[in-house]
């Protein structure tokens, strides 16, 4: 009985450790739209608001756009915001179990890097 | 249990309403000063079939390059623009022309879309809002030009300017991402004979408006009265 309890305790501890979020690779980082705490809470509203205006009205904001987010926050190592477990979008979203459907269509690669790679 | 009088209740309700719309208002404040597209502009194309070379595929490959299409022609491959060779059997006259989304004024794809994903922008460009598209493909059936494709497989490494993804319908966007930057569509730029003239049909001084006014041009399936923005010369 005691043995089982110890075993269970070990399991709990290891799973708790496993759930520790990664240290975020914030890429270039910095404050652009709003302070980080505000952005953590509200970035999804900005993205959704901007996407409808961009698609339907052609209002393409240079600052408030997924492309611009990725431009700064993609990793400096692999130019991606989604490629690794500690990538900017992935690390939090996986921890919070919120799917990032954006990237089923949008690329997670920094545009400047993509252009350099695909230059003729 | 406390009695809430009418005035008190209304005050509380108003307060709650203000809080709930506050994020929206705030978002509106954060919006930019740019100008939305308007119906003063009607983007269109005039394609000169006389100078379009049979066998030349430059517009098609430019489209694939720009929008990240595979360039394949299988039934499950996305094709936003196709080269068509037609021949009048009685006279033997052959014509080669590119056909893509005709950007109709009254698009049937928009009529049939159950989620309003298929829509016409104010400046006449017919697009799919992939955020709303459920992939039902009614628009593909409704389109008389076979201009739309369905994405069957997951995609990676899309052009950052051209998001595309599995489970949605897509078609020629008239390179909307380029047009919004003041550039011309990729096919227009790639054509070695300058057979594709792009411009604003509503601007009377634009090259395309002048040409449409002075030379005979036709719309494909004009009998459907969809008033496409793409016109063909010498068809």
Image (cartoon, helix red, strand yellow):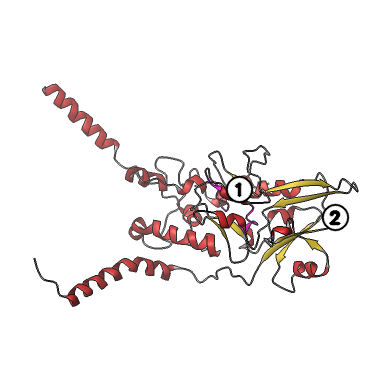
Residue A62 visible: no
- Looking at the rendered image, the quarter that the N terminus of chain B falls into is bottom left
- Judging from the image, mark 2 belongs to the subunit labelled B
Of the residues under marks 2 and 1, which one precedes in the sequence?
A: 2
Residue B144 at what x, y percent from top left?
Answer: 67, 51
Would residue B162 be counted in the magenta stretch? yes
Would residue A28 be counted in the magenta stretch? no
Residues flagged by tags 2 and 1 on a common chain: yes
Magenta residue span? B161-177
Residue A44 at what x, y percent from top left?
Answer: 40, 56
Residue B65 visible: yes
Residue B12 at what x, y percent from top left?
Answer: 21, 71
Crowd around label 2: few <14 · some 14–19 · many ≥20 (10 Å): some
Which of label 2 and label 1 is nearer to you?
1
Residue identified by numbered label 2:
B50
Residue B219 at what x, y percent from top left?
Answer: 75, 59
- Looking at the rendered image, the quarter that the C terminus of chain B falls into is bottom right
Residue B22 located left or right of residue B108: left
The Cα–Cα distance between marks 2 and 1, rounded to whole angstroms, is 29 Å
| Disc number placed over residue B140 in the picture, else none | 1
Residue A80 located left or right of residue B220: left
Give the quadrant of residue B226. Answer: bottom right
Q: Nearer the viewer, residue B160 or A57?
A: A57
- Residue under the point 51% across and 57% down: B116
Q: Residue furthest front?
A: B223
């Amino acid at each position: 009985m005691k043995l089982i309890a110890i075993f269970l305790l070990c399991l709990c501890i290891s799973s708790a450790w496993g759930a520790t979020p990664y240290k975020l690779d914030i890429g270039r980082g910095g404050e652009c739209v709003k302070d980080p705490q505000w952005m953590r809470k509200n970035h999804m509203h900005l993205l959704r608001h901007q996407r409808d205006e961009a698609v339907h009205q052609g209002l393409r904001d240079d600052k408030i756009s997924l492309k611009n987010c990725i431009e700064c926050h993609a990793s400096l190592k692999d130019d991606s915001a989604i490629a690794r477990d500690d990538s900017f979008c992935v690390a939090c979203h996986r921890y919070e179990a919120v799917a990032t459907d954006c990237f089923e269509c949008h690329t997670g690669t920094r545009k400047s890097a993509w252009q350099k790679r695909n230059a003729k | 249990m406390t009695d809430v009088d009418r005035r008190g209740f209304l005050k509380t309700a108003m307060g709650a309403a203000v809080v709930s719309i506050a994020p929206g208002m705030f978002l509106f404040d954060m919006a930019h000063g740019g100008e939305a597209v308007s119906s003063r502009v009607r983007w269109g194309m005039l394609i000169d079939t006389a100078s379009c070379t049979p066998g030349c595929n430059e517009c098609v490959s430019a489209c694939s390059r720009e929008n990240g299409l595979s360039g394949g022609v299988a039934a499950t491959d996305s094709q936003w623009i196709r080269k068509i060779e037609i021949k009048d059997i009685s006279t033997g006259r052959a014509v080669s022309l590119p056909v893509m989304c005709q950007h109709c004024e009254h698009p049937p794809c928009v009529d049939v879309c159950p989620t309003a994903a298929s829509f016409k922008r104010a400046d006449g460009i017919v697009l799919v809002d992939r955020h709303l598209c459920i992939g039902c493909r009614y628009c593909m059936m409704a389109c008389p030009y076979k201009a739309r494709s369905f994405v069957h497989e997951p995609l990676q490494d899309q052009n950052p300017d051209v998001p595309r993804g599995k489970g949605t319908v897509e078609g020629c966007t008239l390179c909307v991402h380029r047009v919004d930057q003041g550039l011309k569509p990729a096919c227009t730029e790639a054509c070695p004979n300058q057979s594709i003239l792009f411009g604003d049909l509503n601007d009377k001084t634009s090259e395309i408006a002048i040409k449409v006014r002075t030379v005979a041009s036709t719309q494909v399936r004009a009998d459907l009265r969809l008033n496409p923005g793409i016109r063909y010369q010498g068809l």
